[in-house]
Every structure is written in C-alpha cells, then in structure tokens.
Amino acid sequence: MAEPMVLELRDAARHFDVSRPLLQRIVAREGRRTLRAVDGVSFSIPKGTTLSLVGESGCGKSTVARLVVGLYSPTRGEVIFDGMPLAEARADPTKRQRMQMIFQDPYASLNPRWRVRDIVAEPLRAFGLVQGREAQQKRVGELLAQVGLNPLDGEKFPHEFSGGQRQRISIARALSSNPEFLVCDEPTSALDVSVQAQILNLMLDLQKRLGLTYLFISHNLAVVRQVSDRVGVMYLGKLVELAPSETLFHTPRHPYTRALMEAIPDLEMTGRQRIPVGGEVPSPITPPPGCTFHPRCPLANDRCRVEVPAMLPARGTPETVVACHAVEEGRDGALSPPLG
Amino acid sequence: MRAFFQSDLWWSFTRSPVTVASAIVAFICIAGAVLAPVLAPHNPFDLASLQLMDAFKPPVWGSEGDATYPLGTDDQGRDMLSAIMYGARVSLLVGFCAVIFSTTLGVALGLLAGYLGGKVDAVLMRIADIQLTFPSILVALLVDGVVRAALPRETHDQIALFVVIFAIGISNWPQFARTVRGSTLVERNKEYVQAARVIGLPSLKIMAQHVLPNVMSPVLVIATLNLGFAILAEATLSFLGVGVPPTQPSLGTLIRIGNDFLFSGEWWITIFPGVALIIMVLSVNLLGDWLRDALNPKLR
Amino acid sequence: MSQTQSMGGQALLQVRNLRVEFPTRRGTLVALDDVSFDIHPGEVLGVVGESGAGKSMTGAAIIGLLEPPGRIAGGEIRLAGRRIDDLPYEELRRIRGRQIGAIFQDPLTTLNPLYTVGDQLVETITTHLPLNPAEARRRAVEWLEMVGIPAAAQRVDSYPHEFSGGMRQRVVIALALCAEPKLVVADEPTTALDVSIQAQVIALLKTLAREKGTAMMLVTHDMGVIAETADRVAVMYAGRVIEIGAVRDVVKHAAHPYSAGLMGSIPPISHRVERLEQIDGSMPRLSSIPPGCPYNPRCPRVFDRCRVERPELLPAKANRAACWLYAPGEEGRLHG
C-alpha cells in the first residue's frame, strides 16, 4: 500500500428521520423512526484503483456515494478525502474540483433546458478553470471528443441524444474540472447492454489514460467484475465483505455474497440451477438484531442472532475482510468449491 | 423564430380553431386598449371636447343613433367606444401588473420553500394555506380597506392604481407558490441538480439557473389563467367602488356608472363595457386552457 | 373452440406480418414492421432487444393494449386459430381476461390499491370460471400458496401496499394465471426486482408454464433471464424480428451480426475480459430507419446489398436470421 489513499471512510453512517408528522405520531402513540441507510462503513481507495460497492436496492450503496461527494453529511464517523476531512476539502474549490460524480439516469442528469456545451462548461465556469468564451468552447470540444462525441454536438440539447450518448455527455461534464476521483452511481444500469459495454470500455480507457480513481456503485456483479480492483458487498447499510475482486469472485466468503452469486442467471448455459435466496431484505428501519442477515442465512446460530459480527480478516483468504461469525469460527463449510 | 414555428406548441396552436380565434380576439382587445390614444375616435377625458348635449345617445343602430358615437354616449356625452378602449387600458394594465407581481412573489417564495425545505418551507406554506382559506377577492378588499384607512385621502388617490395592483397581486401568490414548490421538490431531487451541488454551486445559483427554467411551464399556464382572474377582480373592486380612482375609469368603473341607468332605459352604458369585459376575459382564459393542455405532456 | 387433433402442429399464438404504425405530425412511424412468429402450448418464447426495438409493443399489440395513436396497420394475430387483432373492444377484453394473462414490469400499476388481493383474485376467477364466490375464494388462496406467499390464508385479505415488491409481483402472477389463460404475455416481469428475488420469480413462472401447459411470451432485455427460461428466442431490432431460433442456438451461436454483437457485449461473470465487445453507435430512431437492413450502418460485415435490399428471415446456422450473409449465392462472405 505505497500509494496514498484518495478516499477513506471511517465508520461512516447516515441516518434519516422518517418519522411521521408530530400530530400523527401523537395520535398513533409512536416514537420517532430512524432509517439507518448507512450504518458504520469503513473502507479506503488507493489512488488509481477502482473500489466497487454491490448490493441489492436499499442496501445503502447509493447513500454511500452521496456521503462521499458531500450531498449528505455523515451522521457519525468520518469521510476523508485526500488526507483531509471532507467538509474542509469541499470548502476549498481547488480540492472540490478534484471529485466528480456520474449518475444513474441519463435522462435526469442533464438539465433539459441547457445546451450540451453549457452543460459541459458548467464546472469550467464554476471553478474558473478556463477564461474566455472561445477558450471554453474549445475545451468543451476537446472534452466531447474525448468521450467519443462530435465537438459540434455541443450546440444541441440533451433530448436530441440517446441514453448512451447522454451518459457520455455526463462523463464529459465530470471530466471538465480535471478530477482525479470519480464517484459512479450505477452509471450503466439504465442503459442497454450493447451501450453498457461502450460506456464501461470508455470508463476503463479514461482510467488508464488519466489515472482516475473510481468509486463504482452497481447491483450488477458481472459489471463489477469487469471494472473493479476491490469489491465491497453491502447489506442493510453495512459492509459484509470487502476483498480484492478476483478473490471475491473466486472465493466468496460471506453467506450473503455466496447467495448473490448463486442467484445470478446462468448465461453460459452450463445447466447450473439458480439457487434463490430465501426470504426478503428486512426493513432498514427495524433491522434484525445481531447479524442483520441471520433471518435468511443457512449458517445462522444463536450467536448470530445476538452479536453483531465485526469485519475481520477471513481464515484462508486473509486479503478478505468479512463480517460473519460462521467464517470466523470456521463453520462456513470452509472455502467451498469456487463458482463456475 | 424559425424554431418557434416548427415547435410542437405552434403546431398544436394551429390545430385548434377556438384557440386561434381567441388569440385573434385577445390581440384585438389588447391592441385596441394599448393604442387607444391613437385609435379611439374621441378622447373621453378631454373636458373641452365633451358635448353635454350629446349625452345619452343610443348606439348607432338606435332610432336617435349618431354615427360619430357608434356605441352611443354616457350621461356626460362621452363616446362609449372610446371610454371602453380607455377603460380596457386601465383594466389590462392593472391585470398585467397584478399578475407579474403575484408571479414574481409566488415563484420566488415557492422556489425557496421547495428548494430549502425545512422551517422555511413550513412557515411559507402555512401562510399560503391560511391565505387560501379566504376568497382572494376578500383579501384584495381587505388590503384595499387597510390602505385606505391608513393613508390620507389625497395620497390614496394618487397611489390608488398601485394599491389595486398590490391588493390583487398579493391575493394570488399562494397559487403560484404552491405550484412552483411542488415542481421544485421534483426537480430538486433530479440528478442534474445534484450534479450542480457536487460542483459546489451556491443554492441561489442552482435555483435560478437550474430549477427555475424547469418549473416555469406550469407557471406560464397559471399566469395566463390568472390574467383573466385579475381583470375580473379589478372590475369587481371598481364596481364596488374601491378600485381605481374615478379619474381613470376602468371597465369595472364604467359598468358601475352605467348600472345606475340600466333601468331608466340607457342600457348601452353598462352593457357594452360588460360585453367587452366578458370577451376579453374569455379569450384570455381560452388561451390559458389551450396552453395548459399543450404544455401537459400527458395530453399531447 | 376448434378441436385440435395433433398437439404438436398447431401453434397457440400465430403472429403474421404484424405491422404497427404511429401517425404523427411529422409522418407515420412504423413501430413494428412485418413481425411474424408462433408460440406453441407449453412453450416459452423469449423476445429480446434494446429499448425501442419494439418488443414491448409486440406484447401490447397481442394483448390489444396499444397506446393510441398506435394502431395495427397490417398482418394478423391468431389465438388458437381465431383472429383477435380485429375484434371489437368488448370482445377483446373478454378474451384478454380469459385466454390471455398479462404481467407487467411494475406490479403497482396492475393491482388496484383499493381492494384486497383476495377480492381481485376472486373477481377475476368468478368472471372467467364457473365457480361460486366461496369456491373462488378457496381457489384464490390456493393460487397465493402456489406462487409462494407464506400464510396465504391470512394474506388473502391484505391490500397490495402491505406486500413487499417481490411478493407483489407474485400476486400479479397469481392474478394473471388464476383464470387459467392459454397464453401469458410477461413484459419485463423481473426487471423491477432484486437479483435474489428475480431468481425466485423466474423459477415460479417457468414451473407454472410447464405444469399448466401455458404458452408464454417473455419480453425482457435481460439475456440471463431468457437463457434460463425460454425455449426459443426472437431477437428484435428497429421494429423487426432479425433472428429467431432455439435459445441455446441463439445465445451460443448467434447467426445475425447484431445478435452476435449483443451476446458478446454482455459482461461475463466468470472471468475478467481485457475489453468488452461493443457495438458502436446506437439503434436508429423510428423516424430515421435506414433503407435495406436496419442494422447496416453499425454492421461490421455490411456489403452493398444490405444498404439497398431488405433481408427476410432466412435459414442461418441452426436459426433463422434476416441477414444477406445467409442468402443463396453469398456463402463466400460468411467465411471470408
């Protein structure tokens, strides 16, 4: 770990007050209700690498993305960007311009009333990076070319583009402030699969060329495998497993990670049966005690129902940190045969 | 301009004969009012040209009709057509100004409430809720009454026009504010606004540059429909005698004056301003209805 | 009802040269162009393609729920030998409930929030089957059990909002199947669901179709779901079927360059590739479909004929593909 960390989260949490209005609470005699969208997440991302967070909807992965760029402030814990607390870093424009975000919905992430050139130039103007209209337009043209669009496309409005092209515009906007760190919140999940490949290839090319660091949020394990150096699996607001990508896909340790992988459709048509995970994700307002996965876990025992497991290096795959009593105790059918 | 004539809006406009007709009528009303000093056959406020002898002349098709006064004259010998054109001028001026006032106020407060949320939102919306429980004409009457009581009569007459504009405008802002707040809540959570927040743009800039242009379509519709309402409200106030000063009679003033003669047979003095008012408000409202349908993506 | 002697020969659903048009102010858009396929009883036909390819439109045309101003402008749709594309609305509505079940992506739009799921099931069952309310209720509970809703006897009196997303989609499936239709049109039934729930729902659909001999049209953009569930696959592009064949043949040995590209661009889960295969460009809008083969501007194997002449479905490998590479006389290009 010679490379410096671009981003570090230390026990970061974000809770939302989802209580009903005061009057209704009094009538129904209920207390305040807190949604623990993110509940104590720690990880760090070395420069030039990609960390992916995967999980099902409601697991808190998108909230982590918004914590990291400062759209939400943490309820607890710390977010450290470039060795500095996030709030301080974001107060300084020269630091702030080094982080950018790419969003999921290419139809909502571009202001429909703005021309593409103004959209892409917005960070340039906000940070005063390029002076003069002509120089700005020249830079916009370069950025559009960099993401595989025609520099003349700047004159058009977003609705004249397809979903994939819009996502390219989003990327051009993000790149315009010369960031080194990009938070990508499900950047391809709204796109068709052939276009998804275009965007993923573009993102990988840009990373190589510009030395970018990515925090990549996705629910698609196959996509995650293609882009990540390390992968974190989230369940109900917590990381349950964090490992180098190859290790994770080769030897998933947490029962939830294994269940996720077994639930993936079998495109290779090997005849492998999908094994559905029983039950459903519980509500993050009233999470189960102990390990939050225990109601769905085949390995759960009394300890799992009471004691919250900590993230510990796993036996056998020491590069993996995993929050599971069964792995710690070695009763996870240790290192079961790898997938595929 | 070329883009406008190729737009869906223009296309839907040309496809609706009622809308085209009301646009033409509205245009004639506005042009007649604005250009009254040029177009009107007489100047009803030029005392020198008033002929008391010509009072109570019926319209030109009546038995004693006079071609110089096509719609007849009132009790002081003023030409009704000219009086209506000048009156419409005042009505429209008050209407437009009141709508601009309530739009500006409502949009600004709605944006703030929707974008900032929390206490600002709660306070502003409760005020709007309370005001909405009163009929807006009552609010306008109240405001006018308070100003009337607070200021000496002379001062009041000087600023009467502004008082009416303020009274009508203030009675209508909640409608704009609530609509804008609703749209703002939707837009605020869209990713293009979040992208601007990630860059670190100040809230006011995001509201003005990103949210505002995207919440304006419904505002345009309400503003058009409100123009009709504001003209009517002004007429109502003037009819009740608390509106514009008598030195600048609006259509409502004309109707009130003529009302005294309705049962003595001089019906034209009140009917013609009334008809003019109806035509003007109706054409504006029909335009507003069309605009609402044309800008609603679900009905397109 | 016609008494079909041989089960093997007669297709339950026959779509022939279906053409759907959308008249707009800038001219008529052809949303579906010459679409033909069959579905046999007990068979699952997967329909795949990118958004805007016309796959959902095909489903809507069959159910008779095309959104105006869209209209069927040519061709025919036959259910068990009977034409259903030109029926009056009322008759079509009866058929839709009794013989065709529909499952949509968003379960919330299918369920009425004001009635309990039991009420909705009972209503559907009594409308279409000769059962009295008590029997219908018993049948409703059976269906809820069959689709895997725990404590079905109690849950039958719950309202839709009391179910979670995955459970709601199960209720929708029960609702679509409880009148025992011969054909089920499922449009992206698992897209709104999480992976772990998806697997449950797919397994359920598959078993039910097999057991009841229901024919199913499964519309989705998720090739994984198709690979697992479908017997045959139709690949759509720009409103046309460009390849159709057995699922294994299409997924593993696609004949049309577009299908091949589509399969290649799916990121594999089993290993990391150096670079994903990608198809450059994007699907043309309906207003600007190029002449000849609609895929020709993006096709790596394009030649002159593709730009002029529109290809019909031709035998290609083990499938049928609308591609000139497989025309008699062009054999040389295939390997060249």
Image (cartoon, coloured by chain):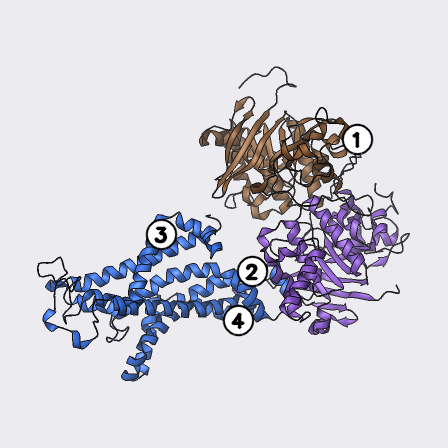
Asked whether C198 or A118 is in front, the reply is A118
Q: Are marks 4 and 3 on the same chain?
A: yes
Mark 4 residue element:
helix
Looking at the rendered structure, the kind of residue marked 4 is Val
Nearer to us of marks 2 and 4 is 2
Looking at the rendered structure, the kind of residue marked 2 is Glu
Asked whether A243 or A37 is in front, the reply is A243
Q: Which residue is mark 1?
A: C335
Q: Which residue is mark 4?
A: B120
Label 3: how many Cα within 10 Å (few below 14, some 14–19, many 20+): some
Image location of residue C240, percent across then percent down: 61, 34
For chain A, the rendered hue is purple
For chain C, the rendered hue is brown
Q: Are marks 2 and 1 in contact (CB under 8 Å)?
A: no
Q: Are marks 3 and 2 on the same chain?
A: yes
Between the C-alphas of marks 3 and 1, the distance is 64 Å
Nearer to us of marks 2 and 1 is 1
For chain B, the rendered hue is blue
Label 1: how many Cα within 10 Å (few below 14, some 14–19, many 20+): few
Q: Label for residue B187?
A: 2
